[in-house]
Image (cartoon, helix red, strand yellow):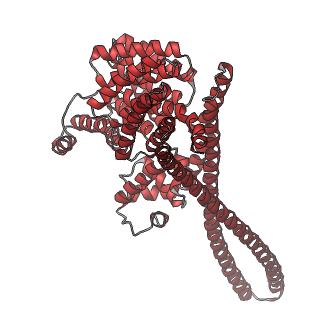
Protein backbone atom coordinates (compact mmCIF):
# COMPACT_ATOMS: atom_id res chain seq x y z
CA UNK A 1 0.00 0.00 0.00
CA UNK A 2 2.82 2.37 0.99
CA UNK A 3 4.71 1.55 -2.17
CA UNK A 4 1.77 2.57 -4.32
CA UNK A 5 1.50 5.84 -2.44
CA UNK A 6 5.19 6.61 -2.87
CA UNK A 7 5.78 5.71 -6.52
CA UNK A 8 4.15 8.75 -8.13
CA UNK A 9 5.71 11.40 -5.91
CA UNK A 10 9.22 11.51 -7.36
CA UNK A 11 8.21 12.92 -10.74
CA UNK A 12 8.49 16.48 -9.44
CA UNK A 13 12.02 16.13 -7.95
CA UNK A 14 13.99 17.28 -11.00
CA UNK A 15 11.71 20.27 -11.65
CA UNK A 16 11.92 21.45 -8.02
CA UNK A 17 15.70 21.01 -7.97
CA UNK A 18 16.19 22.99 -11.18
CA UNK A 19 13.94 25.88 -10.19
CA UNK A 20 15.70 26.23 -6.85
CA UNK A 21 19.11 26.03 -8.50
CA UNK A 22 18.20 28.97 -10.71
CA UNK A 23 17.29 30.97 -7.61
CA UNK A 24 20.64 30.14 -6.04
CA UNK A 25 22.51 31.09 -9.21
CA UNK A 26 20.83 34.50 -9.33
CA UNK A 27 21.86 35.15 -5.72
CA UNK A 28 25.47 34.22 -6.33
CA UNK A 29 26.15 36.08 -9.56
CA UNK A 30 24.76 39.55 -8.83
CA UNK A 31 27.92 41.71 -8.60
CA UNK A 32 28.55 44.10 -5.73
CA UNK A 33 32.11 45.42 -5.73
CA UNK A 34 32.05 49.21 -5.27
CA UNK A 35 33.79 49.27 -1.86
CA UNK A 36 36.14 46.50 -0.75
CA UNK A 37 35.82 46.94 3.05
CA UNK A 38 35.36 44.42 5.84
CA UNK A 39 33.94 46.94 8.28
CA UNK A 40 30.95 45.70 10.30
CA UNK A 41 27.47 47.07 9.63
CA UNK A 42 27.24 48.75 13.05
CA UNK A 43 30.59 50.44 12.47
CA UNK A 44 29.46 51.65 9.06
CA UNK A 45 26.30 53.12 10.57
CA UNK A 46 28.41 54.96 13.13
CA UNK A 47 30.57 56.35 10.34
CA UNK A 48 27.46 57.64 8.55
CA UNK A 49 26.45 59.59 11.66
CA UNK A 50 29.91 61.10 12.09
CA UNK A 51 30.56 61.71 8.37
CA UNK A 52 29.96 65.13 6.87
CA UNK A 53 30.90 64.81 3.14
CA UNK A 54 27.90 63.58 1.19
CA UNK A 55 30.03 61.44 -1.12
CA UNK A 56 31.38 59.54 1.89
CA UNK A 57 27.83 58.91 3.09
CA UNK A 58 26.91 57.55 -0.34
CA UNK A 59 29.83 55.09 -0.18
CA UNK A 60 28.77 53.96 3.28
CA UNK A 61 25.12 53.54 2.28
CA UNK A 62 26.19 51.38 -0.67
CA UNK A 63 28.55 49.32 1.46
CA UNK A 64 25.78 48.56 4.00
CA UNK A 65 23.38 47.72 1.15
CA UNK A 66 25.90 45.21 -0.22
CA UNK A 67 26.42 43.58 3.17
CA UNK A 68 22.67 42.99 3.49
CA UNK A 69 22.44 41.49 -0.03
CA UNK A 70 22.51 37.82 1.01
CA UNK A 71 20.55 38.22 4.27
CA UNK A 72 17.98 41.03 4.06
CA UNK A 73 17.00 42.38 0.61
CA UNK A 74 14.57 44.83 2.25
CA UNK A 75 17.49 46.53 4.01
CA UNK A 76 19.47 46.44 0.77
CA UNK A 77 16.63 48.32 -0.91
CA UNK A 78 16.40 50.91 1.89
CA UNK A 79 20.10 51.81 1.97
CA UNK A 80 20.50 51.69 -1.82
CA UNK A 81 17.55 54.08 -2.20
CA UNK A 82 19.15 56.44 0.32
CA UNK A 83 22.34 56.39 -1.71
CA UNK A 84 20.29 56.95 -4.88
CA UNK A 85 18.41 59.93 -3.45
CA UNK A 86 21.62 61.59 -2.22
CA UNK A 87 23.41 60.86 -5.52
CA UNK A 88 20.61 62.41 -7.59
CA UNK A 89 20.52 65.40 -5.25
CA UNK A 90 24.25 65.97 -5.86
CA UNK A 91 23.87 65.28 -9.60
CA UNK A 92 26.50 62.50 -9.38
CA UNK A 93 25.95 60.34 -12.48
CA UNK A 94 28.14 57.38 -11.51
CA UNK A 95 26.67 56.95 -8.02
CA UNK A 96 23.14 57.43 -9.37
CA UNK A 97 23.64 54.65 -11.93
CA UNK A 98 25.35 52.35 -9.42
CA UNK A 99 22.72 52.93 -6.71
CA UNK A 100 19.87 52.16 -9.13
CA UNK A 101 21.69 48.95 -10.14
CA UNK A 102 21.79 47.78 -6.51
CA UNK A 103 18.13 48.76 -6.02
CA UNK A 104 17.28 46.58 -9.05
CA UNK A 105 19.16 43.65 -7.49
CA UNK A 106 17.17 44.06 -4.27
CA UNK A 107 13.87 44.07 -6.19
CA UNK A 108 14.92 40.86 -7.99
CA UNK A 109 15.76 39.20 -4.67
CA UNK A 110 12.28 40.20 -3.45
CA UNK A 111 10.68 38.72 -6.60
CA UNK A 112 9.49 42.10 -7.92
CA UNK A 113 10.84 41.73 -11.46
CA UNK A 114 8.81 44.56 -13.03
CA UNK A 115 10.21 46.99 -10.45
CA UNK A 116 13.66 45.51 -11.06
CA UNK A 117 13.32 46.20 -14.77
CA UNK A 118 12.26 49.81 -14.11
CA UNK A 119 15.21 50.33 -11.77
CA UNK A 120 17.67 48.94 -14.34
CA UNK A 121 16.30 51.30 -16.97
CA UNK A 122 16.89 54.21 -14.59
CA UNK A 123 20.45 52.95 -14.02
CA UNK A 124 20.96 52.67 -17.78
CA UNK A 125 19.73 56.25 -18.28
CA UNK A 126 22.49 57.60 -16.01
CA UNK A 127 25.14 55.15 -17.27
CA UNK A 128 24.70 56.34 -20.87
CA UNK A 129 25.93 59.78 -19.76
CA UNK A 130 29.18 58.37 -18.30
CA UNK A 131 32.48 58.11 -20.15
CA UNK A 132 34.40 54.88 -20.91
CA UNK A 133 36.10 54.93 -17.49
CA UNK A 134 32.94 53.28 -16.12
CA UNK A 135 32.43 50.74 -18.88
CA UNK A 136 32.19 47.81 -16.43
CA UNK A 137 29.22 49.41 -14.66
CA UNK A 138 27.44 49.77 -18.02
CA UNK A 139 28.14 46.08 -18.67
CA UNK A 140 26.72 45.00 -15.30
CA UNK A 141 23.52 46.95 -15.98
CA UNK A 142 23.13 45.28 -19.39
CA UNK A 143 23.71 41.88 -17.78
CA UNK A 144 21.03 42.69 -15.20
CA UNK A 145 18.58 43.39 -18.03
CA UNK A 146 19.50 40.03 -19.52
CA UNK A 147 18.77 38.34 -16.18
CA UNK A 148 15.30 39.93 -16.06
CA UNK A 149 14.43 38.58 -19.51
CA UNK A 150 15.93 35.18 -18.65
CA UNK A 151 13.61 34.89 -15.64
CA UNK A 152 10.71 35.73 -17.97
CA UNK A 153 11.70 32.88 -20.35
CA UNK A 154 12.54 35.45 -23.06
CA UNK A 155 15.80 33.79 -23.99
CA UNK A 156 16.50 35.61 -27.26
CA UNK A 157 16.26 38.99 -25.51
CA UNK A 158 18.40 37.67 -22.64
CA UNK A 159 21.10 36.44 -25.04
CA UNK A 160 21.09 39.84 -26.78
CA UNK A 161 21.86 41.72 -23.53
CA UNK A 162 24.38 39.08 -22.40
CA UNK A 163 26.29 39.54 -25.68
CA UNK A 164 26.19 43.33 -25.29
CA UNK A 165 27.53 43.10 -21.72
CA UNK A 166 30.21 40.55 -22.72
CA UNK A 167 31.52 42.92 -25.39
CA UNK A 168 31.89 45.71 -22.80
CA UNK A 169 33.49 43.42 -20.18
CA UNK A 170 36.05 42.27 -22.76
CA UNK A 171 36.74 45.88 -23.73
CA UNK A 172 37.30 46.75 -20.05
CA UNK A 173 39.34 43.54 -19.51
CA UNK A 174 37.02 42.72 -16.59
CA UNK A 175 37.73 39.02 -16.04
CA UNK A 176 35.14 38.55 -13.28
CA UNK A 177 32.44 40.17 -15.40
CA UNK A 178 33.30 37.88 -18.31
CA UNK A 179 32.90 34.90 -15.99
CA UNK A 180 29.46 36.08 -14.88
CA UNK A 181 28.31 36.29 -18.50
CA UNK A 182 29.68 32.80 -19.26
CA UNK A 183 27.58 31.50 -16.37
CA UNK A 184 24.54 33.33 -17.80
CA UNK A 185 25.05 31.73 -21.21
CA UNK A 186 25.31 28.31 -19.53
CA UNK A 187 22.02 28.88 -17.68
CA UNK A 188 20.23 29.70 -20.94
CA UNK A 189 21.58 26.57 -22.64
CA UNK A 190 20.67 24.50 -19.56
CA UNK A 191 17.09 25.81 -19.64
CA UNK A 192 16.77 25.15 -23.37
CA UNK A 193 18.13 21.59 -22.92
CA UNK A 194 21.36 22.27 -24.89
CA UNK A 195 23.40 20.45 -22.29
CA UNK A 196 26.66 20.19 -24.26
CA UNK A 197 26.81 23.96 -24.77
CA UNK A 198 25.83 24.57 -21.16
CA UNK A 199 28.70 22.37 -19.98
CA UNK A 200 31.22 24.28 -22.12
CA UNK A 201 30.26 27.62 -20.57
CA UNK A 202 30.05 26.26 -17.02
CA UNK A 203 33.65 25.06 -17.44
CA UNK A 204 34.70 28.49 -18.72
CA UNK A 205 33.01 30.12 -15.74
CA UNK A 206 34.71 27.66 -13.35
CA UNK A 207 38.09 28.37 -14.93
CA UNK A 208 37.74 32.12 -14.36
CA UNK A 209 36.46 31.76 -10.77
CA UNK A 210 39.36 29.40 -10.03
CA UNK A 211 41.90 31.86 -11.46
CA UNK A 212 40.34 34.63 -9.34
CA UNK A 213 40.40 32.48 -6.20
CA UNK A 214 36.67 33.01 -5.61
CA UNK A 215 35.61 29.89 -3.75
CA UNK A 216 31.89 30.76 -3.59
CA UNK A 217 31.89 31.33 -7.34
CA UNK A 218 33.64 27.99 -7.77
CA UNK A 219 31.02 26.38 -5.55
CA UNK A 220 28.26 27.81 -7.72
CA UNK A 221 29.93 26.40 -10.85
CA UNK A 222 30.46 22.99 -9.23
CA UNK A 223 26.84 22.85 -8.13
CA UNK A 224 25.49 23.76 -11.56
CA UNK A 225 27.76 21.24 -13.24
CA UNK A 226 26.70 18.55 -10.79
CA UNK A 227 23.04 19.12 -11.59
CA UNK A 228 23.81 19.27 -15.29
CA UNK A 229 25.65 15.94 -15.21
CA UNK A 230 22.69 14.44 -13.36
CA UNK A 231 20.40 15.60 -16.18
CA UNK A 232 22.86 14.04 -18.65
CA UNK A 233 22.81 10.73 -16.69
CA UNK A 234 26.55 11.08 -16.05
CA UNK A 235 26.36 9.73 -12.52
CA UNK A 236 30.09 9.75 -11.61
CA UNK A 237 30.57 13.37 -12.70
CA UNK A 238 27.36 14.42 -10.95
CA UNK A 239 28.71 12.96 -7.69
CA UNK A 240 32.19 14.42 -8.19
CA UNK A 241 31.06 18.03 -8.71
CA UNK A 242 28.27 17.87 -6.15
CA UNK A 243 30.82 16.74 -3.53
CA UNK A 244 33.05 19.69 -4.46
CA UNK A 245 30.11 22.09 -4.12
CA UNK A 246 29.23 20.47 -0.77
CA UNK A 247 32.79 20.94 0.51
CA UNK A 248 32.85 24.66 -0.34
CA UNK A 249 29.37 25.26 1.10
CA UNK A 250 30.42 23.56 4.35
CA UNK A 251 33.63 25.56 4.49
CA UNK A 252 31.80 28.88 4.18
CA UNK A 253 28.78 27.75 6.25
CA UNK A 254 26.54 28.50 3.24
CA UNK A 255 23.65 26.41 4.57
CA UNK A 256 21.09 27.24 1.90
CA UNK A 257 23.60 26.45 -0.83
CA UNK A 258 24.50 23.20 0.96
CA UNK A 259 20.99 21.78 0.61
CA UNK A 260 21.29 21.57 -3.20
CA UNK A 261 24.34 19.26 -3.56
CA UNK A 262 22.94 17.14 -0.73
CA UNK A 263 19.73 16.71 -2.68
CA UNK A 264 21.62 15.81 -5.87
CA UNK A 265 23.79 13.31 -4.00
CA UNK A 266 20.75 11.76 -2.32
CA UNK A 267 18.92 11.37 -5.62
CA UNK A 268 21.93 9.98 -7.51
CA UNK A 269 22.77 7.54 -4.71
CA UNK A 270 19.21 6.26 -4.73
CA UNK A 271 19.33 5.79 -8.51
CA UNK A 272 22.54 3.78 -8.09
CA UNK A 273 20.92 1.57 -5.47
CA UNK A 274 23.09 2.97 -2.68
CA UNK A 275 20.12 3.58 -0.42
CA UNK A 276 22.02 4.03 2.85
CA UNK A 277 24.11 6.87 1.40
CA UNK A 278 20.97 8.39 -0.08
CA UNK A 279 19.39 8.33 3.39
CA UNK A 280 22.45 9.98 4.97
CA UNK A 281 22.47 12.85 2.45
CA UNK A 282 18.71 13.38 2.72
CA UNK A 283 18.97 13.37 6.52
CA UNK A 284 21.62 16.13 6.43
CA UNK A 285 19.42 18.15 4.08
CA UNK A 286 16.43 17.70 6.41
CA UNK A 287 18.42 18.86 9.46
CA UNK A 288 19.42 22.07 7.66
CA UNK A 289 15.87 22.65 6.42
CA UNK A 290 14.53 22.17 9.96
CA UNK A 291 17.05 24.67 11.37
CA UNK A 292 16.23 27.26 8.69
CA UNK A 293 12.48 26.58 8.78
CA UNK A 294 12.28 26.10 5.00
CA UNK A 295 9.05 24.15 4.48
CA UNK A 296 9.67 23.24 0.84
CA UNK A 297 13.11 21.81 1.64
CA UNK A 298 11.68 19.90 4.62
CA UNK A 299 8.97 18.46 2.40
CA UNK A 300 11.45 17.37 -0.30
CA UNK A 301 13.85 15.85 2.24
CA UNK A 302 11.04 13.77 3.78
CA UNK A 303 10.03 12.74 0.27
CA UNK A 304 13.56 11.49 -0.53
CA UNK A 305 13.82 9.68 2.80
CA UNK A 306 10.46 7.99 2.30
CA UNK A 307 11.51 6.75 -1.15
CA UNK A 308 14.90 5.45 0.10
CA UNK A 309 13.48 3.68 3.16
CA UNK A 310 10.80 2.12 0.97
CA UNK A 311 13.54 0.72 -1.29
CA UNK A 312 15.33 -0.84 1.71
CA UNK A 313 12.13 -2.47 2.91
CA UNK A 314 11.89 -0.33 6.05
CA UNK A 315 8.23 0.44 5.53
CA UNK A 316 7.72 1.81 9.03
CA UNK A 317 10.23 4.66 8.54
CA UNK A 318 9.09 5.04 4.94
CA UNK A 319 5.56 5.59 6.17
CA UNK A 320 6.74 7.99 8.91
CA UNK A 321 8.57 10.22 6.41
CA UNK A 322 5.81 9.93 3.87
CA UNK A 323 3.33 11.05 6.51
CA UNK A 324 5.56 14.05 7.34
CA UNK A 325 5.86 14.85 3.63
CA UNK A 326 2.07 14.59 3.23
CA UNK A 327 1.39 16.87 6.21
CA UNK A 328 3.78 19.55 4.94
CA UNK A 329 2.41 19.27 1.42
CA UNK A 330 -1.19 19.45 2.69
CA UNK A 331 -0.36 22.48 4.85
CA UNK A 332 0.85 24.31 1.76
CA UNK A 333 -2.24 23.24 -0.17
CA UNK A 334 -4.52 24.24 2.72
CA UNK A 335 -2.92 27.66 2.84
CA UNK A 336 -3.66 28.12 -0.85
CA UNK A 337 -7.26 26.91 -0.29
CA UNK A 338 -7.80 29.37 2.57
CA UNK A 339 -6.54 32.21 0.42
CA UNK A 340 -8.94 31.23 -2.35
CA UNK A 341 -11.86 31.06 0.09
CA UNK A 342 -11.02 34.55 1.34
CA UNK A 343 -10.91 35.81 -2.23
CA UNK A 344 -14.31 34.25 -2.99
CA UNK A 345 -15.78 35.82 0.12
CA UNK A 346 -14.38 39.22 -0.83
CA UNK A 347 -15.73 38.80 -4.34
CA UNK A 348 -19.20 38.00 -2.97
CA UNK A 349 -19.16 41.03 -0.69
CA UNK A 350 -18.03 43.22 -3.58
CA UNK A 351 -20.85 42.03 -5.81
CA UNK A 352 -23.33 42.65 -2.99
CA UNK A 353 -22.06 46.19 -2.53
CA UNK A 354 -22.26 46.79 -6.28
CA UNK A 355 -25.93 45.82 -6.21
CA UNK A 356 -26.55 48.21 -3.32
CA UNK A 357 -24.80 50.99 -5.21
CA UNK A 358 -26.94 50.33 -8.27
CA UNK A 359 -30.11 50.65 -6.16
CA UNK A 360 -28.86 53.90 -4.61
CA UNK A 361 -28.01 55.30 -8.03
CA UNK A 362 -31.50 54.47 -9.31
CA UNK A 363 -33.10 56.15 -6.30
CA UNK A 364 -30.84 59.17 -6.72
CA UNK A 365 -31.77 59.43 -10.39
CA UNK A 366 -35.50 59.28 -9.54
CA UNK A 367 -35.01 61.93 -6.88
CA UNK A 368 -33.24 64.22 -9.35
CA UNK A 369 -36.02 63.76 -11.90
CA UNK A 370 -38.69 64.62 -9.31
CA UNK A 371 -36.77 67.72 -8.23
CA UNK A 372 -36.40 68.78 -11.85
CA UNK A 373 -40.15 68.51 -12.49
CA UNK A 374 -40.92 70.42 -9.32
CA UNK A 375 -38.39 73.09 -10.25
CA UNK A 376 -39.88 73.44 -13.75
CA UNK A 377 -43.43 73.73 -12.41
CA UNK A 378 -42.33 76.22 -9.77
CA UNK A 379 -40.45 78.19 -12.37
CA UNK A 380 -43.47 78.38 -14.65
CA UNK A 381 -45.67 79.55 -11.76
CA UNK A 382 -43.13 82.17 -10.76
CA UNK A 383 -42.90 83.40 -14.34
CA UNK A 384 -46.72 83.75 -14.53
CA UNK A 385 -46.82 85.61 -11.23
CA UNK A 386 -44.00 87.85 -12.31
CA UNK A 387 -45.73 88.60 -15.63
CA UNK A 388 -49.02 89.41 -13.89
CA UNK A 389 -47.25 91.55 -11.30
CA UNK A 390 -45.43 93.52 -13.97
CA UNK A 391 -48.73 94.43 -15.57
CA UNK A 392 -50.62 95.45 -12.40
CA UNK A 393 -48.15 96.21 -9.61
CA UNK A 394 -46.30 99.39 -8.90
CA UNK A 395 -42.60 99.97 -9.26
CA UNK A 396 -41.98 99.07 -5.59
CA UNK A 397 -43.85 95.84 -6.11
CA UNK A 398 -41.67 95.17 -9.09
CA UNK A 399 -38.51 95.79 -7.02
CA UNK A 400 -39.78 93.50 -4.27
CA UNK A 401 -40.53 90.72 -6.74
CA UNK A 402 -37.07 91.07 -8.28
CA UNK A 403 -35.49 90.83 -4.82
CA UNK A 404 -37.48 87.69 -4.04
CA UNK A 405 -36.43 86.18 -7.34
CA UNK A 406 -32.77 86.86 -6.56
CA UNK A 407 -33.19 85.10 -3.22
CA UNK A 408 -34.78 82.14 -4.90
CA UNK A 409 -31.95 81.91 -7.41
CA UNK A 410 -29.38 82.02 -4.59
CA UNK A 411 -31.26 79.26 -2.75
CA UNK A 412 -31.38 77.16 -5.90
CA UNK A 413 -27.63 77.60 -6.40
CA UNK A 414 -27.08 76.56 -2.80
CA UNK A 415 -29.15 73.43 -3.30
CA UNK A 416 -27.36 72.66 -6.55
CA UNK A 417 -24.01 73.09 -4.81
CA UNK A 418 -25.08 70.72 -2.04
CA UNK A 419 -26.29 68.15 -4.57
CA UNK A 420 -23.04 68.48 -6.53
CA UNK A 421 -21.05 67.89 -3.33
CA UNK A 422 -23.08 64.77 -2.57
CA UNK A 423 -22.66 63.54 -6.14
CA UNK A 424 -18.91 64.20 -5.95
CA UNK A 425 -18.62 62.11 -2.79
CA UNK A 426 -20.66 59.33 -4.39
CA UNK A 427 -18.45 59.41 -7.51
CA UNK A 428 -15.34 59.20 -5.33
CA UNK A 429 -16.77 56.22 -3.44
CA UNK A 430 -17.75 54.53 -6.72
CA UNK A 431 -14.29 55.17 -8.17
CA UNK A 432 -12.67 53.64 -5.10
CA UNK A 433 -14.91 50.57 -5.39
CA UNK A 434 -14.09 50.29 -9.12
CA UNK A 435 -10.36 50.35 -8.27
CA UNK A 436 -10.89 47.61 -5.69
CA UNK A 437 -12.80 45.49 -8.21
CA UNK A 438 -10.11 46.08 -10.83
CA UNK A 439 -7.44 45.04 -8.33
CA UNK A 440 -9.32 41.83 -7.51
CA UNK A 441 -9.62 41.14 -11.23
CA UNK A 442 -5.83 41.44 -11.62
CA UNK A 443 -5.22 39.09 -8.67
CA UNK A 444 -7.72 36.54 -9.98
CA UNK A 445 -6.16 36.67 -13.45
CA UNK A 446 -2.60 36.29 -12.12
CA UNK A 447 -3.63 33.34 -9.91
CA UNK A 448 -5.12 31.64 -12.94
CA UNK A 449 -1.95 32.26 -14.95
CA UNK A 450 0.15 30.93 -12.04
CA UNK A 451 -1.85 27.70 -12.06
CA UNK A 452 -1.44 27.36 -15.82
CA UNK A 453 2.31 28.09 -15.56
CA UNK A 454 2.68 25.45 -12.83
CA UNK A 455 0.92 22.83 -14.96
CA UNK A 456 3.09 23.78 -17.97
CA UNK A 457 6.23 23.32 -15.83
CA UNK A 458 5.08 19.87 -14.72
CA UNK A 459 4.29 18.82 -18.28
CA UNK A 460 7.66 20.15 -19.42
CA UNK A 461 9.57 17.85 -17.05
CA UNK A 462 7.68 14.81 -18.32
CA UNK A 463 8.33 15.39 -22.04
CA UNK A 464 11.59 14.64 -23.81
CA UNK A 465 10.55 15.53 -27.37
CA UNK A 466 12.66 18.58 -28.31
CA UNK A 467 10.07 20.15 -30.59
CA UNK A 468 7.34 19.80 -27.99
CA UNK A 469 9.64 21.25 -25.32
CA UNK A 470 10.35 24.25 -27.52
CA UNK A 471 6.63 24.97 -27.92
CA UNK A 472 6.07 24.50 -24.18
CA UNK A 473 8.95 26.88 -23.39
CA UNK A 474 7.43 29.53 -25.64
CA UNK A 475 4.04 29.07 -23.96
CA UNK A 476 5.68 29.36 -20.52
CA UNK A 477 7.49 32.53 -21.63
CA UNK A 478 4.26 34.16 -22.76
CA UNK A 479 2.52 33.24 -19.52
CA UNK A 480 5.40 34.54 -17.40
CA UNK A 481 5.65 37.73 -19.47
CA UNK A 482 1.94 38.33 -18.90
CA UNK A 483 2.47 37.81 -15.17
CA UNK A 484 5.52 40.08 -14.84
CA UNK A 485 4.60 43.01 -17.09
CA UNK A 486 1.01 43.35 -18.23
CA UNK A 487 -1.20 46.16 -19.41
CA UNK A 488 -3.83 45.50 -16.71
CA UNK A 489 -1.35 46.36 -13.95
CA UNK A 490 -0.08 49.44 -15.80
CA UNK A 491 -3.64 50.64 -16.39
CA UNK A 492 -4.45 50.02 -12.73
CA UNK A 493 -1.41 52.09 -11.64
CA UNK A 494 -2.57 54.96 -13.86
CA UNK A 495 -6.08 54.83 -12.39
CA UNK A 496 -4.68 54.77 -8.84
CA UNK A 497 -2.55 57.86 -9.58
CA UNK A 498 -5.58 59.70 -10.95
CA UNK A 499 -8.06 58.59 -8.29
CA UNK A 500 -5.73 59.15 -5.34
CA UNK A 501 -4.13 62.41 -6.47
CA UNK A 502 -5.48 64.33 -3.47
CA UNK A 503 -4.56 61.53 -1.09
CA UNK A 504 -0.96 61.43 -2.39
CA UNK A 505 -0.62 65.22 -1.93
CA UNK A 506 -1.86 65.03 1.68
CA UNK A 507 0.39 62.02 2.36
CA UNK A 508 3.43 63.83 0.92
CA UNK A 509 2.67 66.89 3.10
CA UNK A 510 2.26 64.97 6.35
CA UNK A 511 4.87 62.24 5.77
CA UNK A 512 7.54 63.49 3.31
CA UNK A 513 10.00 60.68 4.19
CA UNK A 514 7.88 57.93 2.60
CA UNK A 515 9.35 56.18 -0.45
CA UNK A 516 7.42 55.83 -3.71
CA UNK A 517 6.91 52.12 -2.93
CA UNK A 518 5.47 52.99 0.50
CA UNK A 519 3.14 55.62 -0.96
CA UNK A 520 1.87 53.05 -3.47
CA UNK A 521 1.34 50.50 -0.67
CA UNK A 522 -0.58 53.15 1.31
CA UNK A 523 -2.95 53.72 -1.61
CA UNK A 524 -3.64 49.97 -1.93
CA UNK A 525 -4.19 49.58 1.83
CA UNK A 526 -6.61 52.54 1.65
CA UNK A 527 -8.69 50.37 -0.70
CA UNK A 528 -8.96 47.74 2.09
CA UNK A 529 -7.08 45.15 0.03
CA UNK A 530 -5.57 42.12 1.78
CA UNK A 531 -1.85 41.27 1.78
CA UNK A 532 -2.56 38.45 -0.69
CA UNK A 533 -4.34 40.82 -3.08
CA UNK A 534 -1.65 43.51 -2.77
CA UNK A 535 1.11 40.95 -3.41
CA UNK A 536 -0.63 39.94 -6.67
CA UNK A 537 -0.86 43.60 -7.78
CA UNK A 538 2.68 44.65 -6.77
CA UNK A 539 4.12 41.32 -7.98
CA UNK A 540 5.84 40.57 -4.65
CA UNK A 541 5.34 37.90 -2.01
CA UNK A 542 2.68 38.27 0.76
CA UNK A 543 5.53 38.18 3.27
CA UNK A 544 7.12 41.22 1.62
CA UNK A 545 3.75 43.01 1.81
CA UNK A 546 3.50 42.25 5.55
CA UNK A 547 7.03 43.56 6.04
CA UNK A 548 6.08 46.68 4.08
CA UNK A 549 3.02 47.20 6.30
CA UNK A 550 5.22 46.88 9.39
CA UNK A 551 7.72 49.47 8.11
CA UNK A 552 4.88 51.78 7.07
CA UNK A 553 3.35 51.62 10.58
CA UNK A 554 6.71 52.64 12.06
CA UNK A 555 7.08 55.59 9.69
CA UNK A 556 3.49 56.72 10.33
CA UNK A 557 3.95 56.22 14.12
CA UNK A 558 0.86 53.96 14.34
CA UNK A 559 0.64 51.31 17.07
CA UNK A 560 -0.64 47.81 16.36
CA UNK A 561 -3.97 48.55 18.08
CA UNK A 562 -5.03 51.01 15.38
CA UNK A 563 -6.36 49.87 11.98
CA UNK A 564 -3.91 50.98 9.28
CA UNK A 565 -6.54 51.16 6.51
CA UNK A 566 -8.85 53.33 8.64
CA UNK A 567 -5.96 55.67 9.45
CA UNK A 568 -5.04 56.06 5.77
CA UNK A 569 -8.65 56.75 4.79
CA UNK A 570 -8.68 59.65 7.28
CA UNK A 571 -5.77 61.41 5.57
* Farthest front residue in view: 313
Percent of width and height locating residue 449: 64, 41
Q: Which of 231 and 320 is in front in this view?
A: 320
Q: Is residue 441 positioned above or below 310 on the image?
A: below
Which of 9 and 535 lies nearest the eye of the viewer?
9
Q: Position of residue 478 (x, y in %)?
A: 64, 32
Q: Quadrant of residue 474?
A: top right
For the N terminus, the quadrant is top right
Residue name at image x 37 percent, y 29 percent:
28
Visible in this render: residue 190? yes
Question: Percent position (x, y) of residue 495?
Answer: 59, 50
Specify whether 212 is left or right of 400.
Answer: left
Q: Residue at x 68, y 23 (%)?
A: 468
Q: Depth check: 270 or 151 in front?
A: 270
Between 273 and 223, the residue placed more toward the observer is 273
Q: In this view, does 210 lie to the left or right of 415?
A: left
Horizontal and vertical percent for residue 529? 54, 58
Residue at the spot 50% in from the left edge and 58% down from the top edge: 525
| Residue found 30% across the figure and 26% down from its top | 248
* Image-quadrant location for residue 265: top left
Amino acid sequence: MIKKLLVTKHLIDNAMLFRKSLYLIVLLILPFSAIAQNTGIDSLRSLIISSTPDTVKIDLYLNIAQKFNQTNPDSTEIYALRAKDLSEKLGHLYYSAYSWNIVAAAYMRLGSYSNGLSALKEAQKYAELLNDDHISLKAHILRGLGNIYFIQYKYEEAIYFYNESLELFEKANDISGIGFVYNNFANVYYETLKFDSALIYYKKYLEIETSQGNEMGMGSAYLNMGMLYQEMDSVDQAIEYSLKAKEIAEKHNALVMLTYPLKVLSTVSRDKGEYQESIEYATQSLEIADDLGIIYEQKDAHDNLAASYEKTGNYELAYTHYKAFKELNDSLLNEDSNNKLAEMRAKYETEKKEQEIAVLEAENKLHKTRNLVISLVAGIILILISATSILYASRKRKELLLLEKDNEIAESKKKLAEEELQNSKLREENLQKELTNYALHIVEKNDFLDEVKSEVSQIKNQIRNQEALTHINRLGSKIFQNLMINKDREEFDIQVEQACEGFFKNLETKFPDLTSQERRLSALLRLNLSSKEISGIMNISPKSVDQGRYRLRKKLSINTQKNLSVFLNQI
